[in-house]
Every structure is written in structure tokens, then in C-alpha cells.
Image (tube, rainbow, N blue to C red):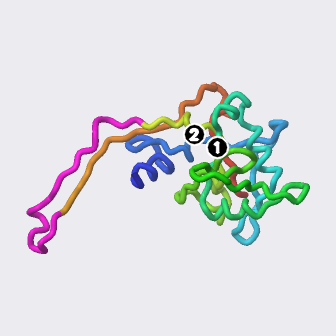
Amino acid sequence: GRIINRATTLGLGGVEPEGFTLGSIQGVTSDGSTALTVASTAGVPVLAYNELLELEHSIDPAIRMSGSSWMMHDLTMLRYRLVKDQDNRPLWQPSLTAGRPDLLLGYPITVNQLLETGAAAGEKIVFFGDFKSYKVRQVGGTRSYRLTELYRGEDQDGFVAFQEVDGGILNPYSSATEGPIKHLQTV
């Protein structure tokens, strides 16, 4: 599972899956004139309420209302837990029901420890959109083998498994600025 998560998150395409970080599109401001960025001070991104709203509304409303969610590193999530709106209310809404996700601006949040935290310029730190548009294709089943002879000198057995996987974002738009998953990037 961790190997597939790495490939579907960070994969470069070609002989490996195209990770959603590569296939996502940088969000733009509501007037469409400026790419959404997050300032960084001493390697720590300065996260703001308005940037989240702009990213949320850079996604087509039809896609946004069909099950969109946030994805970010745990450290980025902590930083957003500290952000408040203009009325000094936290953006973070902890779940009061077991098994239900915490919410950020009313949308569920997924933590992915492989995502960047904003320590350097050009890092993609927050993703928003319909992650169901990222499709994973698994060819055949998982093949696993027990290697009894290789480790016999140590009185151990080895195990190895193989699985063929590919993935990518299915983008219904022909425009290079539209897509089902968008991100904020540090400057």
C-alpha cells in the first residue's frame, strides 16, 4: 500500500504511474489573472484563509459539489488548524462523530505524508478537488512468493510481492487551466 501510495502521489509517468502531484493544476485567483501561491518566511509557509477560499473556488462548482476534499501533509494540516477566519473562528472543524473526517471549510481532509510542507519555493503543499478523478489501474492480482532457500543459512524465510499498477487524473476539460484537482504552491 505504501509503495502504491508513493507511485500514485509522486510518480513521474512513463514507466511508473503519473502521480496526482504531477497531474494537478495550479489554482488561480477568482478573476483568473494570477496563479495562487503561498508566501514563505524562513522556510515556513504563511497560510491564509483567503488562499484556501480562492483554491476552493478555482474548481468548477459541479466538480466541487460532487465530493471534493483537501489533501496535505500532516505538518501543513497543523498549520491550518491554527488559522482563523476574519471573525477569529478556526477554519478547522473537528469531527464529533467517530469514523467521520475532520473538515476544513466544510470539506474532508486527507493526510498524505509524502506531500511537501513548503520548506522551499516551488513546493506544492495543498491540494483540493475531486480525487475520485484520479484513477488507479491494477493489472492482475498481487503475486507473492516465499523464498525459503535464500535465507536458510540464517534460519529465516523471505517474502517478495509484485503488482502492476498505473494511474493518472482523468481531466474532462480541454483547457490547460481547468482540472478536477488543483494545488497551492509556495513562492
Residue 131: image x %, image y %? 57, 39
Q: In this view, does 58 lie above or below 74?
A: above
- In the rendered image, residue 86 lying in the magenta stretch gets the answer no
Query: 156 left or right of 3?
Result: left
In this rendering, the count of numbered labels is 2
Q: How crowded is mark 2: few (under 14 residues within 10 Å), some or many (20 or more)?
A: some
Nearer the observer, 19 or 92: 92
Seen in the image, is 135 located left or right of residue 40? Answer: left
| SS state under label 1 | strand
As for residue 151 lying within the magenta part, the answer is yes
The residue singled out by tag 2 in the image is 131
Quarter of the image for residue 147 reads bottom left
Residue at figure coordinates x 79%, y 50% from the top left: 51
* Residue 19, position as x, y percentages in the image: 50, 45
Q: Mark 1 points at which residue?
A: 69
Mark 1 is on which residue type?
Answer: Ser
Work out which residue is located at the far bottom of the displayed protein and give it: 154
Q: Position of residue 96 (x, y in %)?
A: 67, 54
Q: Where is residue 72 in the image (x, y as percent from the top left)?
A: 62, 54
Amino acid on which the number 2 mark rests in the picture: Phe
Q: Is mark 2 on a helix, strand or loop?
A: helix
Q: Give the range drawn in magenta.
A: 137-157
User: Are there few (<14), some (14-19), or many (20+) residues within 10 Å of tag 1?
Assistant: many
